[in-house]
Amino acid sequence: MSDKPHQNLAIIGHVDHGKSTLVGRLLFETGSVPEHVIEQHREEAEEKGKGGFEFAYVMDNLAEERERGVTIDIAHQEFDTDEFYFTIVDCPGHRDFVKNMITGASQADNAVLVVAADDGVAPQTREHVFLARTLGIGELIIAVNKMDVVDYSEDKYKDVKEQVNKLLKQVRFNSDDATYVPISAFEGDNIAERSDNTSWYDGDILLEALNSLPAPQPPTDAPLRLPIQDVYTISGIGTVPVGRIETGTLNPGDNVSFQPSDVGGEVKTVEMHHEEVDQAGPGDNVGFNVRGVGKDDIRRGDVCGPADDPPKVAETFKAQVVVMQHPSVITAGYTPVFHAHTAQVACTIESIDQKLDPASGEVAEENPDFIKSGDAAIVTVRPQKPLSIEPSSEIPELGSFAVRDMGQTIAAGKVLEVNER
């Protein structure tokens, strides 16, 4: 771990626009991946007839992904710049992976949007920008990639910049906060060093742009919220819930409560990377043991918090949703699966309260009969079984969700208020 401030950085953008190659290049240029590893990947890529994919290979280290040539899981990789210690949340581009993108992007502080110079704004570019905005990503750095493919043409760069700017305005992203950098992840232009190929460009190169991002405020002053990913039984210790601390801190001796299972007790030990620690904070993956809590008492999707300020459990909640895709229309009574932090719960949309103008956020219609793809709305939701969720204004880390049905992501949203049970 580094003593520099930490940032989670999402790398988003359309499939094949060069996200994985850029990530591999960033890791290489910052010394996080040694030369010989890249060399090894280069040989492997050439054997498979995918020469030039060596940087992408650094990220896609799942064999299955290499065969298919796409990024599936969210890979976490780390690198240091002069100012920050970054964890990359590499967000897959394909549609069936949008759920990963949502659970991934909601953990990111800022994002790099990769747009290929030869292709410009593509359908997923739109979707990812929309999601980034809905999920509260702060600043965007737009990497106009593949400049080598368009012979480093300034006109091409300006054209893409114009397209993206228009898109940012459509989704009300503060486009003044966006930085544009012409790069080639493949050749390495304007990533760690200024390139002679783009003598017309005098702005920040990518690492400089990353260094000038605002430092995120760690959510340590918020109460502890730790969504449970798994529960293990470990001989000699007992029941060990495992998860990532979203807010607050966890210490041995703390009295905690698990919701919605509604059990609790005193924390005996906290472990990170198989070592006992006396405190863990936001972003840490921990395993911990709680006196008197057995394996059957708690489950994935529970949230652990302080006994005197336990996680909220929703009877119903109000949310702002954005419908990304749905074959027909969504009406009251629709019951898809909501994915919030580690929980997956079927929830019924009880009422559609307001339809919003997605461009301005103003109310366009009260109590509409239905909403469809592209619409934004305020809805009232009733979980079919207990769900712990928080208003995103209070604890944003537990306030966003994805809505899935028929094997795809239908909508994304954030919680406005929780009516507790």
Image (spheres, grey):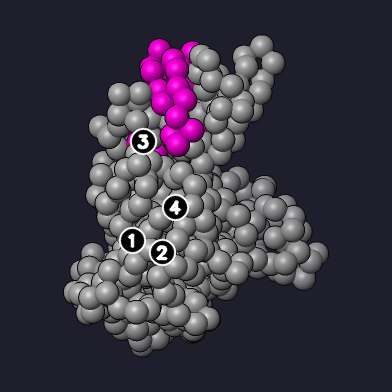
Q: Earlier in the sequence, mark 2 or mark 4?
A: 2
Classify 10 Å Cα crowding around label 1: few (below 14), some (14-19), many (20 and above). many
Q: CA distance from mark 3 to mark 1?
A: 20 Å
Q: Which mark is residue 311?
A: 3
Which amino acid, by three-letter code, is at mark 3?
A: Pro
Give the x, y percent position of residue 212: 27, 53
Nearer the observer: mark 4 or 3; the answer is 4
Observer able to see residue 86: no
Locate residue 68: give its quadrant. Answer: bottom right
Specify whether 116 is left or right of 20.
left
Q: Earlier in the sequence, mark 3 or mark 1?
A: 3
What is the magenta range?
Answer: 243-271
Q: CA distance from mark 4 to mark 3?
A: 16 Å
Q: CA distance from mark 2 to mark 4?
A: 9 Å
For the C terminus, the quadrant is: top left
Give the x, y percent position of residue 56: 61, 61
Q: Is residue 351 above or below residue 298?
A: below
Residue nearest the observer in this picture, 191 or 74 = 74
Label 4: which residue?
383
Instruction: Determine whether label 2 and label 1 are within 8 Å by CB.
Output: yes
**x 57%, y 51%: residue:** 75
Locate residue 45: give its quadrant. Answer: bottom right
Residue nearest the observer in this picture, 185 or 216 = 216
Q: CA distance from mark 1 to mark 4?
A: 10 Å
Which amino acid, by three-letter code, is at mark 2?
A: Ile
Classify 10 Å Cα crowding around label 4: few (below 14), some (14-19), many (20 and above). many
**x 67%, y 20%: residue:** 234
Which amino acid, by three-letter code, is at mark 1?
A: Thr
Q: CA distance from mark 2 to mark 1?
A: 6 Å
Which amino acid, by three-letter code, is at mark 4?
A: Pro
Q: Which mark is residue 349?
A: 2
